[in-house]
Image (cartoon, helix red, strand yellow):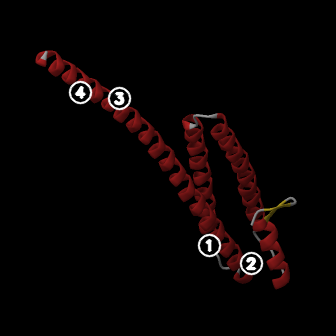
Amino acid sequence: MYRNRLLLSFGLLVMFCIVQAVAAFWTSGIAAYHVERGRVSNQMLAEFIALGADKQRLKVWLAQYLLTNDAPLSERDRLLVQMEHILSNLQSLLVNDQLLSDDEQGYQEVNRQIRALSILETNIFALKRSLLDKESITLSEAEIWRLLIQTFDKLGLVDLS
């Protein structure tokens, strides 16, 4: 009788340990999934911040170029290449995020971000074309300000600021 109770208690203890191990393994997998999604999101945020900073640097470069005609063209080219590199990084991060999406709502959110990134890419390439066309321009200060706003903050009728 005492032995049967001891075996039953031991069996229940082993069963609880197995259930606890399975639960720990399952929560570990879920935690790893969320850590990976957080890592991708954090990298995307860092890339967007870097893209915005480079866009502002390019805006300052254009203002300096238009006002003093003394801005180095190599700086413009470096910033444009850097922005294209950031866009390709964002594209690959969005693909990773899409692969990590586990439900329809997450998948739709990533698709919305991909569409927003395509608009951003269109803006950056239009900006590049516009900046490469502005090799020798003489404008008044008011026209320079309008040109800066038109070049950096508008894409067609869309306000990008």
- Could you say which is closer to the camera, residue 31 or residue 126? 31
Which callout, 4 or 2, points to the residue nearer the camera?
4
Any mark on residue 22, and which?
3
Q: Could you tell which of marks 4 and 1 lies nearer the N-terminus?
A: 4
Q: Is residue 18 toward the left or the right of residue 98 in the image?
A: left
Q: In which quarter of the image is the C terminus?
A: bottom right
Q: Is mark 1 on a helix, strand or loop?
A: loop
Q: Could you tell which of marks 1 and 2 lies nearer the N-terminus?
A: 2
- Could you say which is closer to the camera, residue 1 or residue 27? 1
Give coordinates of residue 55: x percent, y percent: 65, 66
Q: Which residue is drawn at 86% across and 58% down?
A: 156
Which callout, 1 or 3, points to the residue nearer the camera?
3
Three-letter residue code for mark 2: Leu
- 81 shown above or below 88: below
Any mark on residue 66, and which?
2
Which callout, 4 or 1, points to the residue nearer the camera?
4
- Could you say which is closer to the camera, residue 134 or residue 2? 2
Give coordinates of residue 159: x percent, y percent: 81, 63
Any mark on residue 72, and which?
1
